[in-house]
Every structure is written in structure tokens, then in C-alpha cells.
Image: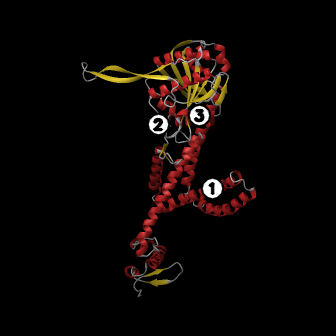
């Protein structure tokens, strides 16, 4: 190869004469690997010798080195794309699973969790997190615009996950597998030392893009800590300020205020005791329904809950008080019935509890209070201890378009008939009749809405966490399932300020 015409001083003080355009043409005839190596080296020499030469002769080929031949390039490209898809899907699925577990442990704000399979437990989809991941991917790509920076960020994240996994694996070896502690220590020392080398190398790139996963981890950790701290303080306030049974017994059968006709369902997250929202309500409005039910809805980690095991019913206080506690259990694939069906099953379960108590039938006791025991009972569809009749009723409504036209709507109204049996005593029959009369009047849903504020004299950090951080997350997170399932027409929301 003849190299006349131009001369440039190389970094190692060697003079080389060559025509730039001719060299580029002749380099194109070399194999791809050798072509890129020689071309990149020549371009480095030109740029180091003269910045003007770099501007005059810009690089015309990519600096990426392709070590794959032409025949294997397309198959390798397809495999690389499939590997990227599998890796991204594993990250997305793992994120969904982690968020679901954190939400179940009250370490993350409530989100919508969709269970996509009734056979495979843990296969979930979270729409909010999916959109958030998309926005973060776009933000990182647009913000960096450089694969090297994104590679540094990804490298630190992957190595950190590997290091944390090795540490947690040692805990599994000791706690779950019941192996010797020395085995766990040896595992961490062997694998952890190798991963620590990669981690230290990734940390060196902190200011070259590796700071992004650290910043994101700090943001999500702050959200989790704020939500968990606020939820814990709220639960402690509920437990410490719940009304005792002795206070309820001191009021007498009338509870110290007027009892109106109907059934009142008080939604609560407590499975024992009387929530503070009840005393707050009756203190400001001394009237309540003749039949009072503390309703607690729980979602268990199984696909379906059988109808005969769905309701857990108990009595709060003596029989004359007409106060009950009902825990309703749903699986993550159970379909919530409409309002009428739910009310029918709820009243039917309470009626069967009354019958079981009067007949001396002892069911499984899961909770013992001063007023009675909790009993597992089924819904109306699983038992026929009560006679149920359905009567068609016609409601007449005026159409908005024309006052002369009337819209006829047919509804089914469920009525319960107390069976005549010698095994049921007189007090139980009277209780059943009063329950059925209250059901005919209607059911009101009492929903508690709590707002948290810190006490006077608290630290500035606590004020920022509770008054601003937790309240912001609570207002922008998903409402509890009890608030979403309650009918709006017969709902009553009671607000209460929690000073923690």
C-alpha cells in the first residue's frame, strides 16, 4: 500500500505518510473485525495529531466491532432481541410480584392488583406500576441518549441485585433449610467476594450514569417507609382507642341513645373490639339502627372461598343489644355480588347464627369476646335453614324525555320467613323477627374516613412524614375494597381526625 502525500505526527513520534481517502477505500476490502480495528486506530491518531484533521475527515463507519460473520448476523440478532424481551418481561413480572407483597405487608400504597390466573398463585398484573415502568424507561432513554451511560446504570442495578440475593440466600440456608451457620457464611464469602469486585467496579461509574438506580431506589424506599410508618401509626391509634366491651355493657340495651329501624353496617378493619369511629359517631349523633353489624371484609390469598366458609359471625354484647360482628372472606378470584345479593347472604348468615345459638349447635370458634363466639356459617345458597321467598315488585319511573311516558322496572324483593320449629326458643324467634323487620326497612352502610395529623410538640420530621407525605400518598392511592363495594345511595361516610 503506497502512502504518499500527507504526513501526521503520531503519539509515539512515528511519521506516517498516507492519503486519507485512499486508505478508507482500501480498508473497506479488509475483513470486518480487522477493518474496524485499523480504522478506529487511524482515526485516533488523526484526532490526537490535529483537531482540524478530525473535523476535515470525520469518521464514516461505526465504531462498534462486529465479530459475527454475515451468515450468522441475522440469527444472532433475532436471539438478542428475544433475550431482551425475556429479560424485560422477567423484570416487569418480578416488579409486579414485589409490589403485591409490599402492599400486602402495608409497605406500599394500595394499587389495583389483577390476578390473571386462577390456577397459578402469584401471577398478577398491576396497571399503575406498568405505566410507571414505561414512563421511567422513556425518561431514562431520553435523558441519557447514550448506551454507555445506560449500561453503567444497568450494571450497578444488576450487580446490586446479585449481591443482595447472595446475602438473602444465606438467611434462607439457615432459617428455611436449617443448615449450619458456617455453610451460610462460606456461601456469602465465596459468592459475595466475587460480586463485591463487580460492585466496586460499577460504583466507580457512579457519576457516569450509575447514580440513576441509586436515586430511584432512594425514592421508592422513602415512599415505602412513609406509607408503612403512617399505616402503623393509624393501626396503633385504632387499637389504643377502640371502645371496650365494658363501656358498651354500661350503656344498657338501648346503648344510651335512640334506636331507629333498619340495619346499620359499620365497616371496620378490626376483627375484634369496637372501632373508635362508632363512639365518634354516636357521640355527635346519639341515634343508631336497631340492628348493628360491624362488618370486616378480608381478602385471603386463595383463588376462591367456598360459600359455606365465607361468613364468620359473632355476637357483641348480650342478645338484647342486637349487635353482631361479621367477617366476610373473599378469594382473589371471587366475584363480588351486587348489593341485594350481598345483603341477603349477610342477613341469612346472621339468622343461621341465631338459630345455631338457640339450638345448642356448637360451630368452630375462632374468636371469643365477652358477648359471644365467632361461628363459621354459610350463605343462603349453601343452606336452606331459612325459608326465602321472592316477590316481584314493579317500580314506576318517569322518563326524562317525556313526562307522559312511564318506565316500568321489575325488581325482586327478598323476604325471609322464620320457620316454626320446636328447637328454637322464644327469644331467638323474637330476635329473628326483629332482624327480618329491620331487613325490610333497609340497610345503611357506615363508612369511616380517617385523617391523620401529628400531635402538638412533635418533631418537624414527623410532621413532614405524616401531614404531607402520608396524606399525599393516601389521597392519591386506591381506596379500600370496602369503600369501593358499598352502594352510594345508602352509604354514610363518617370522618374522624387521628392525632398521632
Q: Nearer the viewer, residue 4 or 76?
A: 76
For label 1, count other residues whose C-alpha is less than 10 Å away and answer few (under 14), some (14-19) or many (20+): some
Residue occupying the point 67% across, 60% down: 192
Q: Quadrant of residue 279?
A: top right
Q: Quadrant of residue 299?
A: top right
Residue occupying the point 53% across, 36% down: 306
* Visible residue check, residue 277: no
**Disc 3/disc 1 C-alpha distance (Å):** 33 Å
* Circle number at residue 335: 2
Say whether disc 3 or disc 2 marks the residue closer to the N-terminus: 2
How far across and down, in percent of the image, does residue 189 sit?
70, 61
Q: Nearer the viewer, residue 137 or 408?
A: 408
How far across and down, in percent of the image, does residue 143 sit?
46, 54
Q: Which residue is mark 3?
A: 466
* Secondary structure of the residue carrying numbered label 2: loop
Q: Nearer the viewer, residue 377 or 2?
A: 377
Q: Which residue is mark 1?
A: 165
* Secondary structure of the residue carrying numbered label 3: helix
Say whether disc 2 or disc 1 marks the residue closer to the N-terminus: 1
* Secondary structure of the residue carrying numbered label 1: helix
Q: How many marks?
A: 3
In the rendered image, which quarter contains the C terminus?
top right
How far across and down, in percent of the image, does residue 223 sit?
56, 42
Q: For marks 3 and 2, give the one nearer the viewer.
A: 2
Amino acid at each position: 500500500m503506497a502512502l504518499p502525500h500527507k504526513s501526521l505526527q503520531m503519539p509515539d513520534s512515528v511519521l506516517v505518510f498516507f492519503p486519507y481517502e485512499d486508505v478508507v477505500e482500501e480498508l473497506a476490502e479488509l475483513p470486518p473485525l480487522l477493518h474496524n480495528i485499523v480504522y478506529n486506530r487511524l482515526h485516533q491518531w488523526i484526532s490526537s495529531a490535529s483537531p482540524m484533521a478530525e473535523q476535515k475527515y470525520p469518521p464514516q463507519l461505526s465504531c462498534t466491532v462486529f465479530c459475527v460473520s454475515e451468515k450468522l448476523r441475522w440469527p444472532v440478532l433475532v436471539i438478542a432481541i428475544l433475550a431482551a424481551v425475556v429479560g424485560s418481561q422477567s423484570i416487569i413480572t418480578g416488579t409486579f410480584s414485589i409490589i403485591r407483597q409490599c402492599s400486602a405487608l402495608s409497605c406500599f400504597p394500595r394499587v389495583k392488583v389483577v390476578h390473571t390466573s386462577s390456577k397459578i398463585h402469584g401471577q398478577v398484573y398491576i396497571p399503575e406500576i406498568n405505566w410507571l415502568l414505561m414512563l421511567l424507561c422513556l425518561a431514562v432513554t431520553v435523558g441519557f441518549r447514550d448506551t454507555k451511560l445506560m449500561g453503567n446504570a444497568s450494571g450497578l442495578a444488576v450487580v446490586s441485585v446479585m449481591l443482595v440475593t447472595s446475602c438473602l440466600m444465606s438467611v434462607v440456608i439457615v432459617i428455611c433449610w436449617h443448615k449450619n451457620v458456617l455453610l451460610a457464611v462460606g456461601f456469602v464469602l465465596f459468592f459475595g467476594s466475587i460480586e463485591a469486585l463487580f460492585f466496586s467496579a460499577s460504583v466507580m461509574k457512579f457519576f457516569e450514569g450509575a447514580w440513576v438506580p441509586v436515586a430511584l431506589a432512594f425514592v421508592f424506599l422513602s415512599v415505602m417507609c412513609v406509607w408503612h410508618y403512617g399505616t402503623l401509626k393509624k393501626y396503633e391509634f385504632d387499637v389504643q382507642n377502640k371502645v371496650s366491651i365494658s363501656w358498651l355493657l354500661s350503656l344498657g340495651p338501648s346503648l344510651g341513645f335512640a334506636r331507629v329501624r333498619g340495619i346499620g353496617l359499620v365497616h371496620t378493619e378490626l376483627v375484634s373490639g369496637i372501632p373508635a369511629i362508632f363512639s365518634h359517631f354516636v357521640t355527635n349523633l346519639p341515634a343508631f339502627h336497631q340492628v348493628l353489624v360491624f362488618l370486616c371484609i378480608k381478602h385471603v390469598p386463595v383463588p376462591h372461598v367456598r360459600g359455606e366458609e365465607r361468613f364468620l359471625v359473632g355476637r357483641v354484647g348480650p342478645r338484647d343489644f342486637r349487635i353482631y360482628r361479621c367477617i366476610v372472606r373473599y378469594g382473589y378470584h371471587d366475584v363480588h355480588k351486587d348489593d341485594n345479593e350481598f345483603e341477603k347472604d349477610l342477613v341469612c348468615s346472621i339468622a343461621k347464627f341465631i338459630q345455631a345459638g338457640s339450638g345448642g349447635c356448637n360451630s368452630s370458634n375462632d374468636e371469643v369476646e365477652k358477648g359471644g363466639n365467632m361461628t363459621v356459617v354459610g350463605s343462603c345458597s349453601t343452606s336452606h335453614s331459612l325459608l326465602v321467598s321472592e316477590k316481584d315488585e314493579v317500580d314506576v319511573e318517569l322518563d326524562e324525555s317525556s313526562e307522559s311516558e312511564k318506565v316500568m322496572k321489575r325488581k325482586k324483593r327478598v323476604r325471609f320467613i322464620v320457620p316454626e320449629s320446636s328447637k328454637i326458643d322464644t327469644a331467638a324467634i323474637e330476635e329473628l323477627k326483629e332482624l327480618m323487620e329491620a331487613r325490610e326497612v333497609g340497610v345503611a352502610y357506615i363508612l369511616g374516613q380517617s385523617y391523620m395529623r401529628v400531635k402538638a410538640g412533635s418533631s418537624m420530621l414527623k410532621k413532614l412524614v405524616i401531614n404531607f407525605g402520608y396524606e399525599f400518598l393516601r389521597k392519591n392511592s386506591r381506596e379500600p375494597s370496602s369503600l369501593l363495594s358499598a352502594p352510594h345511595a345508602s352509604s354514610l361516610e363518617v370522618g374522624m381526625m387521628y392525632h398521632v
